[in-house]
């Protein structure tokens, strides 16, 4: 597994990707995106296959999102086989109850490529500037770890934007402010698929990986 692919996995695991253990020594990763992100999920599928992983074809998945008024979501997904080389990612991102967590040392694994994939995977465009990271599934302590990592690694200034869910529940999301995003845009852009550049308010055709 080359470094570029490891960086990509860090980014998508901070986003929508799921990791699971199989036995003591193996793990698998599943990738999922909404159906209208077909270009991006196809890109992830191709990168995973080109990196030497045996993977299934893209499949459609329909589910009810209980967080937001039982909204029906249609997604595209695929998963890797269970492999020993994915075990270190399970050790990083899963607790003993097999729940996804943020490792306390995530700052050591972040770089511009992994941040670019995190934004592509789970970022939300803010037309007035900046970008929001949809960190709904992480708790306040984990979000604090992520914000500190963004500050330490990239000098990114962030704040919390609350998203109201079902039954008055509130989910915390990280907002990267406009100035911070503008400062790192050139370094993010070179790692982003052209279909996802709109998330950082760029409308250009540029794809680079490796």
Image (tube, rainbow, N blue to C red):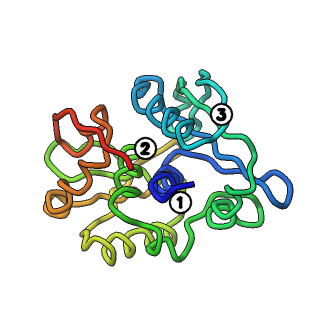
Q: Could you tell me which residue is drawn at 41 percent across and 32 percent down?
A: 40
Residue at 30% from the left image edge and 74% from the top image edge: 151
Q: Which residue carries the number 2 mark?
A: 121
Dot 2 and dot 3 residues touching (CB under 8 Å): no
Residue 41: where, in percent of width, then height? 47, 32
The x, y position of residue 82, in whole percent, is: 75, 46
Q: Which residue is mark 1?
A: 138
Eyeballing the image, is 142 above or below 182? below
Labelled pair 1, 2 in contact (Cβ < 8 Å): no
Q: Is residue 105 left or right of residue 91?
A: left
Q: Earlier in the sequence, mark 1 or mark 3?
A: 3
Measured Cα–Cα span from mark 1 to mark 3: 28 Å
Residue name at image x 28 percent, y 70 percent: 154
Residue 139 at x, y percent in the picture = 53, 64
Q: Label 3 neighbourhood size at 10 Å, few (<14), some (14-19), many (20+)?
A: some
Q: Is residue 170 visible?
A: no
With respect to residue 171, does 158 lie above or below? below
Looking at the image, residue 136 lies above or below residue 52: below
In the rendered image, which residue does mark 3 sit on? 55
């Amino acid at each position: 597994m080359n470094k570029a692919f490891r960086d990509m996995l860090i980014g998508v695991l901070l986003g929508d990707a799921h990791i699971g253990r199989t036995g003591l020594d193996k793990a698998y990763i599943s990738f999922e995106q909404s159906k209208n992100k077909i270009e991006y999920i196809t890109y992830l599928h191709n990168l995973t296959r080109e990196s030497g992983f045996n993977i299934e074809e893209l499949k459609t998945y329909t589910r009810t999102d209980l967080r937001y008024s039982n909204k029906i979501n249609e997604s595209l997904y695929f998963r890797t086989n269970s492999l020993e080389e994915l075990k270190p990612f399970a050790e990083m991102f899963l607790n003993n109850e097999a729940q996804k967590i943020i490792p306390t040392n995530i700052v050591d694994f972040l770089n511009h490529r992994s941040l670019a994939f995190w934004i592509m995977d789970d970022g939300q465009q803010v037309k007035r500037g900046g970008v929001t990271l949809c960190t709904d599934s992480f708790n306040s302590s984990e979000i604090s770890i992520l914000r500190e990592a963004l500050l330490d690694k990239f000098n990114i200034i962030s704040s919390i934007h609350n998203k109201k869910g079902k039954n008055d529940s509130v989910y915390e999301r990280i907002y990267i402010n406009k100035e911070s995003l503008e400062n790192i845009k050139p370094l993010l852009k070179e790692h982003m698929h052209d279909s996802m550049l709109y998330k950082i308010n760029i409308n250009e055709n540029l794809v680079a990986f490796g």
